Image: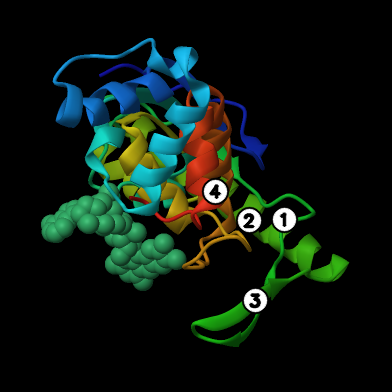
Amino acid sequence: MTEPHPMEIEFRSDVTVELIRAAASDADVLFAARVSTKGEQSLDDVHADPARSKGLINYLMRDRHGTPFEHNSMTFYVQAPIFVFREMMRHRIASYNEESGRYRQLRPVFYVPAPDRKLVQQGKPGHYEFVDGTPEQYKIVVEATKRACEEAYAAYLEMLNAGVAREVARGVLPVAIYSSAYVTLNARSLMNFLSLRTRRESSRFPSFPQREIEMVAERMEAEWARLMPLTHEAFEAHGRVAP
Ligand SMILES: Cc1cc2nc3c(=O)[nH]c(=O)nc-3n(C[C@H](O)[C@H](O)[C@H](O)COP(=O)(O)OP(=O)(O)OC[C@H]3O[C@@H](n4cnc5c(N)ncnc54)[C@H](O)[C@@H]3O)c2cc1C
C-alpha cells in the first residue's frame, strides 16, 4: 500500500462543470424528426430554412414528441460535493463514472457554503422557502463545517497511517467532501434533469431543488443552450417541461 499523503485542506463554495465532448446540435433533432416524413437525413436544413426548423422543434417540444431529442450526446466533467452526486445519480437516464474512494486516497477538498447561500428554511414541507441567515448563523456554519471536516480528515489519515484500507477509512468522511465524475447524457435526459433541478418562475411544474445541485444544473444548461439554441429556446417557451 502507498503511503498516505498529508495534504493541505481546501474549502470551496463552487462546483466545476466542463463540457468535455459533445455531438449535439439542433440539426440532430431535425433529421431525427424528419425521417418520419422524408425517410432521409436533412442535416443542413436548420441553416437552409431556420424559421421552419424553429417551428418543427417548437411543435415537437409542445406536443412532447421526445425521441428526436435523444439523438445527441454531451459529456460533462463535474466536481461537486458527494451530497450533490447522491442526488445527481438518481437521474438514471445518464451514464456516470466517478472517482473511487477505494482505489485512491480522497483529497481533502470540502464544501462550505458561500456567504450568499440562503441558510434558513421557513414554512411547511412542500411549501417552504429559504431565506438569508444572520451573520452569526453564517459564522457558525463556516466554523462548524471546517472543524468537522478537519477532524474527519485527520481521522481518515490516522487510519490510513495505521495501514487500514482506504475503503474502510473513508467511512468517517463527510458528504461535504468533493468528488469528481464524467456524466454523459442526451438533451431529452438533460431537460428532465433541468426541469427538476432548477427553480424557475417560468416552469410549468415548479421544482424546489437544493441550491448546490442547481449550481451544477445551471452550468450544464449554459453549455447546452450554446450547443442547441433552438431546442433550449423551445424548452423555455413551453414551460421547461421535458418532452
Ligand atoms: C426537489 C426534489 C426532491 C426529491 N426528494 C427525494 C426524496 O426525498 N427521496 C428520494 O428518494 N428521491 C427524491 N428525489 C429524487 C426523485 O425521486 C428522482 O429520483 C430524481 O428526480 C430523478 O428523476 P427521474 O426518475 O425523472 O430521472 P431519470 O432516472 O433520469 O429518468 C428519466 C425518466 O425516464 C423514465 N424512467 C426512468 N426509469 C424508469 C423506470 N424504472 N420506470 C419507469 N420510467 C422510468 C421516467 O419517465 C423518468 O422521468 C427528489 C427530486 C427532486 C427534484
Residue at (31% x, 16% y) in the render: 2
Split into 4 quadrants, where in the image is the N terminus?
top left
Calculate the distance from the C-alpha at mark 1 to the C-alpha at mark 4.
36 Å
The amino acid sitting under disc 2 is: Thr
Spatial CA distance of label 4 from label 2 is 37 Å
**Neighbourhood count class around disc 4 (C-alpha, 10 Å): few under 14, some 14–19, many 20 upward:** some
| CB within 8 Å, label 2 to label 1 | yes
Disc number lying in front (2 or 3): 3
Q: Mark 1: which secondary structure?
A: helix
Q: Residue at x 86, y 66 (%)?
A: 135
- Whole-number angstrom distance, CA of label 3 to CA of label 1: 22 Å
- Return the residue nearer the eye: 119 or 147: 119
Return the residue found at the far bottom: 124
- Mark 2 highlights which residue? 145
| Circle 3 Cα neighbour tier, 10 Å, few/some/many (<14 / 14–19 / ≥20) | few
Return the residue at label 3.
Answer: 129
Instruction: Please give the count of numbered marks on the rendered protein.
Output: 4
If you read the primary sequence from the N terminus, does the residue marked by circle 1 or circle 4 appear first? 1
Q: Indicate left or right for 192 with 8 as reference.
A: left
Q: Which residue is mark 1?
A: 142
Q: Nearer the viewer, residue 32 or 4?
A: 32
